[in-house]
């Protein structure tokens, strides 16, 4: 096994200092990740306007909007396939090539969305092309998060893998925040008519151009030391990495899927679904729910960076036992207290975001669960299976059970937190039993 590894808490202080090269890698990786998630989420923010331009005007407004959200959901369907394929080549040909390709695969479709003629020009071809572009985006995002985590972790010095992983995760969640800010700025700078006519294209064009720039910058990055050492020793996967995973690492895959369920529950229920749920449950104005969403996303970003960094010094099992209950507390505060304290939603949304630190534990646990030979494929397979299952099912489940109790979202998040804590605990103990005398490698 390569000597480059995730360090133990006992790593020396000198080895824990980030070099200029490592800082540059973290900045470029986090920036690219933020731009990719920005490109992915602005489609949802602009779905109503997209529906006006890419579906027949003769259709009812609700049907066109439903079709637009269907295109948004198609991106999730493409995530597993794209992630698994890119991870396969990442374990065989190198992390850098795939990490660079993923941001290009996101940037080009995003730019094309901003320039694509609508239904009046292309007819039925317009939504079909938009569907293909959206699926390309989904394939890109399926490889970006796992690839980014592996890339920065394998570049990080001993004792700083948690910090490096947290900064990358913070960049991903920061992309959601960036998308919200750009949409707010767009609506502040242009009239509603201008936004509806042509202004909605600007966020896509901006995201595509900056994404291409991020791809160019990523070409200057070096291959990870872990992969270079594996390549020199001829220890890269000689057969299908997925086959090796299914043969030797089924338990780690299962535990990783459980922990990623918790991640999806936190992001989807406490961040993405919160605005419409608060509008329907407590009749809170959209302007206040948008502010709350921004506060929650900012606090989430701070939380995941901080919690991930703490894993460099504190056991992952201990962290899970702290962050799991906190996630449940944040969920119940968010979905119970706004009704009792009017106009306080941003406060409870911020608290829920801070309680989402468990999200920062998930990539650290998965990176430790798989050996370098199949690490990219292992993280990608578990992450994308969980997102395909729970990312799509969670909104439907919440919508079905919320009419029975307004606390249904909190109960769901709590259930996912229990599953995630169990997954992290079992995964960490299993790995320690496999390698009791050395640090858990990354």
Image (cartoon, rainbow, N blue to C red):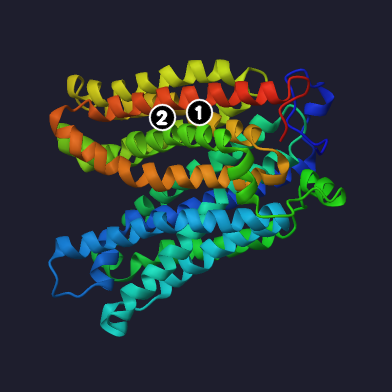
Q: How many marks?
A: 2
Across and down, in percent, residue 312 comes to 67, 24
| Circle on res. 36 | none
Across and down, in percent, residue 99 comes to 64, 55
From the viewer's side, name the closer residue of 84 and 164: 84
Locate the N terminus and report the quarter of the image it occupies: top right
Across and down, in percent, residue 65 comes to 22, 61
Crowding around mark 2 (Cα neighbors within 10 Å: few <14, some 14 to 19, many 20+) is many
Q: Identify the residue under disc 1.
A: 303
Residue 30 appears in the picture as rendered: no
Crowding around mark 1 (Cα neighbors within 10 Å: few <14, some 14 to 19, many 20+) is many
Q: Could you tell me which secondary element the residue under label 1 belongs to?
A: helix
Work out whether mark 2 precedes mark 1 in sequence or the reverse, and give the earlier one: 1
Quote the CA–CA distance across marks 2 and 1: 7 Å
Across and down, in percent, residue 23 comes to 72, 41
Q: Is residue 175 left or right of residue 69?
A: right
Residue at 46% across, 46% down: 385
Q: Could you tell me which secondary element the residue under label 2 belongs to?
A: helix
258 above or below 197?
A: above
Residue at 39% across, 33% down: 266
From the viewer's side, name the closer residue of 437 and 357: 437
Q: Identify the residue under disc 2.
A: 353
29 above or below 405?
A: below
The extreme right residue here reads 232
Q: Are marks 2 and 1 in contact (CB under 8 Å)?
A: yes
Q: Is residue 9 left or right of residue 247?
A: right
Q: Is residue 420 left or right of residue 412?
A: right
Task: Kindly indicate the quadrant of the structure image that contains residue 216.
Answer: bottom right
Residue 42 appears in the picture as rendered: yes
């Amino acid at each position: 096994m390569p000597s480059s590894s995730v360090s133990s808490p006992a790593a020396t202080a000198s080895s824990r200092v980030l070099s200029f090269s490592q800082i540059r890698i973290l900045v470029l990786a986090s920036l690219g990740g933020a731009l990719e998630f920005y490109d992915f989420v602005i489609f949802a923010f602009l779905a109503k306007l997209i529906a006006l331009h890419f579906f027949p005007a003769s259709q009812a407004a609700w049907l066109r909007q439903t079709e637009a959200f269907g295109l948004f959901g198609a991106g999730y369907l493409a995530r597993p396939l794209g992630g698994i394929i890119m991870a396969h080549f990442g374990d065989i040909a190198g992390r850098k090539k795939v990490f660079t390709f993923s941001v290009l695969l996101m940037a080009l479709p995003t730019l094309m969305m901003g320039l694509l003629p609508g239904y009046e020009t292309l007819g039925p071809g317009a939504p079909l092309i938009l569907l293909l572009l959206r699926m390309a985006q989904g394939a890109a995002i399926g490889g970006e998060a796992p690839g980014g985590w592996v890339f920065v972790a394998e570049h990080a010095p001993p004792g700083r893998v948690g910090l490096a992983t947290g900064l990358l995760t913070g960049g991903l969640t920061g992309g959601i925040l960036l998308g919200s800010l750009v949409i707010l700025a767009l609506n502040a700078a242009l009239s509603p008519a201008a936004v509806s006519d042509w202004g909605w294209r600007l966020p896509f064009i901006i995201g595509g151009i900056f994404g291409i720039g991020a791809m160019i910058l990523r070409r200057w990055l070096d291959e990870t030391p872990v992969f270079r050492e594996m390549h020199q020793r001829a220890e890269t996967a000689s057969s299908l990495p997925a086959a090796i995973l299914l043969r030797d690492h089924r338990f780690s895959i299962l535990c990783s899927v459980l922990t990623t369920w918790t991640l999806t529950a936190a992001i989807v229920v406490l961040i993405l679904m919160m605005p419409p749920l608060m509008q329907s449950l407590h009749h809170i104005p959209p302007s206040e729910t948008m502010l709350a969403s921004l506060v929650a996303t900012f606090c989430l970003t701070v939380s995941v960076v901080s919690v991930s960094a703490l894993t460099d010094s504190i056991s992952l099992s201990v962290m899970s036992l702290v962050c799991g209950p906190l996630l449940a507390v944040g969920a119940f505060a968010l979905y119970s207290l706004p009704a009792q304290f009017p106009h306080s939603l941003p406060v409870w949304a911020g608290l829920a975001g801070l309680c989402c630190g468990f999200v920062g534990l998930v990539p650290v646990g998965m990176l430790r669960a798989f050996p370098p030979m199949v690490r990219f494929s292992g993280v990608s397979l578990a992450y994308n299976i969980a997102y395909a299952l729970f990312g799509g099912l969670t909104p439907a489940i919440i919508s079905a059970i919320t009419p029975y109790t307004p606390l249904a979202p909190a109960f769901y998040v709590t259930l996912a937190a229990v599953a995630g804590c169990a997954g992290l605990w079992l995964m960490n103990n299993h790995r320690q039993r496999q390698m009791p005398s050395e640090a858990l490698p990354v």
